[in-house]
Amino acid sequence: MAYLNLSEFIDKLESAGELKRITSPVSRDLEITEITDRVSKGPPAENKALLFENVDGSDIPILINAFGNERRMAMALGVEDLEELHQKLAKLIDLKLPEGMGASLSRASEIFSAFRAVGLKPSRVKNGACQEVVHVEDASLASLPALTCWPDDGGRYITLMQVITRDPETNQRNVGMYRIQVLDDKTAVMHWQRHKGGAEHERLANESGQNQIPTAIVLGGDPVQMWCASAPLPPGIDEYLLAGWLRGKPVTFVECVSQPLEVPADAEIVIEGYVDISDQRLEGPFGDHTGFYTPADYFPAFHVTAITHRNDPIFPATVVGKPPMEDYWMGKATERLFLPLMRLFLGEIVDINMPAEGVFHNLIIVSIKKRFPGHPFKVCYGLWGLGLMMLTKAIVIVDEDVDVHNLSQVAWQVLGNVDWRRDITLVDGPVDQLDHSAIRDSFGGKIGIDATAKGASDGHTRGWPEEITMSEEIIALVDEKWPTFGF
């Protein structure tokens, strides 16, 4: 389903018992983070989306933790549960997956054509709700309730946004989610990591001698659009195409008032401006989704040229830190939706799990239909070659009958099935720029682990033991007698 705006989603959350309104005065400096962190990690019954209606120093309410459990994440994307995302995209793909890289690439092209069929032809309007109030000369970031999330953060941050830029060469739109540190009323710092689309636009602009990249920071709108900014789509694919496909209708756009860009008309707030790649500023430290502070580093400055918003805007935000938090569920939605796309290139994959403790890029567990010696390592190398999967530090491969979402079962299989001399592969390659353990910035060691059962074809001549199971007859007998045992 398509939500008309963020308020409609809030109403849906409230009617489903998934929203808590906080009317007590709260500070956007640290206090909201502490409240949200307790809610995120507390009893499931208390894990709600939070609408802070009385924020010190601001007239704008803050919505946070809106995607903070499986049910709310599913509601945001218009499905009953996140597994439906997998099923929905799988239906778009032929049940008989193509064989060979050429056929897979062709099929992938067909899938993105399907996205385009819904989302490429956008609806445009002259006046959008996001421009009910327009500030140009008097535009000030101080009017927005940006958060100080953790005690050692370098300042206040905008944390849940859609950053719109266009490729300096092709004019193709990119929508990304990058944290933004507010420096003063007119200036912020755009933290787009080197592997992300915005950073690629910076490189292209630098090569062509352009210093300024027109940029729009969009807050709110249909929650599908908000989530899609975090989706790791291939280069050149507009994230709003995916949003249009998931919504069942294209995104409606309005022209910016001060920049040559279009933004979703249903947004709450739009910050217009430009990124000056010649103006590098110190950004951070920042308490990140790794659970550690990312050290301060230099990133390009963003300069405000206008701020537009609804008459009564809502400021969406998120907080990251030690998992699990809201970003885990955003990542889980990505995992389920993109599983069928992984199978296009690696048809032997049965299921995947990126557990919260792995903070996305540190660990992926994969079950496969193993067919030949070395097959698990073939899957490892294949995954490291798929887009941002290149950043994964550890890939664990298990047999198809292992439930990758049952971490106890996975640990038992890994620790029992692996010979550490034979069953691992160590490689060097790109890692996440936030990885503090890497041997150098954005480059380090990675491991692939073959935790599948071994046979003679794997060079294991000793034989493989049979798992312990009870006979069906005894199971049935005990089932019948169970009520008599007093349990």
Image (cartoon, rainbow, N blue to C red):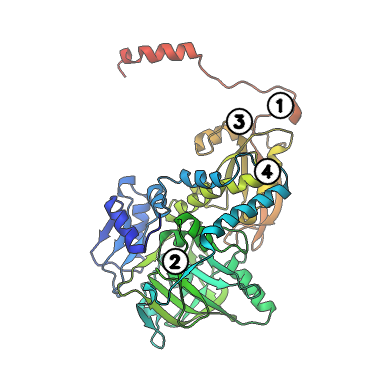
First of labels 2, 3 by sequence position? 2
Instruction: Single out the residue that lies furthest toward the left.
Output: 24
Q: Which-is-in-front pick, marks 4 and 1?
A: 4
Is 96 placed above or below 57 here? above
| Residue 277 rendering spot, x and y as whole percentages | 60, 79
Q: Dot 2 corresponds to which residue?
A: 159
At 44% from the left and 65% from the top, the residue drawn is 160
Q: Nearer the viewer, mark 3 or mark 1?
A: 1
| Disc 2/disc 4 C-alpha distance (Å) | 40 Å
In percent of width and height, residue 253 lies at 46, 71
| 104, 300: nearer the viewer | 104
Q: Is residue 175 above or below residue 291?
A: below
Q: Amino acid at mark 4?
A: Pro
Q: Nearer the viewer, mark 2 or mark 4?
A: 4
**The C terminus, quarter of image:** top left
Q: Can residue 390 be seen by looking at this rendering?
A: no
Counting residues from the N terminus, which is met first, the one under dot 4 or under dot 1?
4
Q: Is residue 335 visible?
A: yes
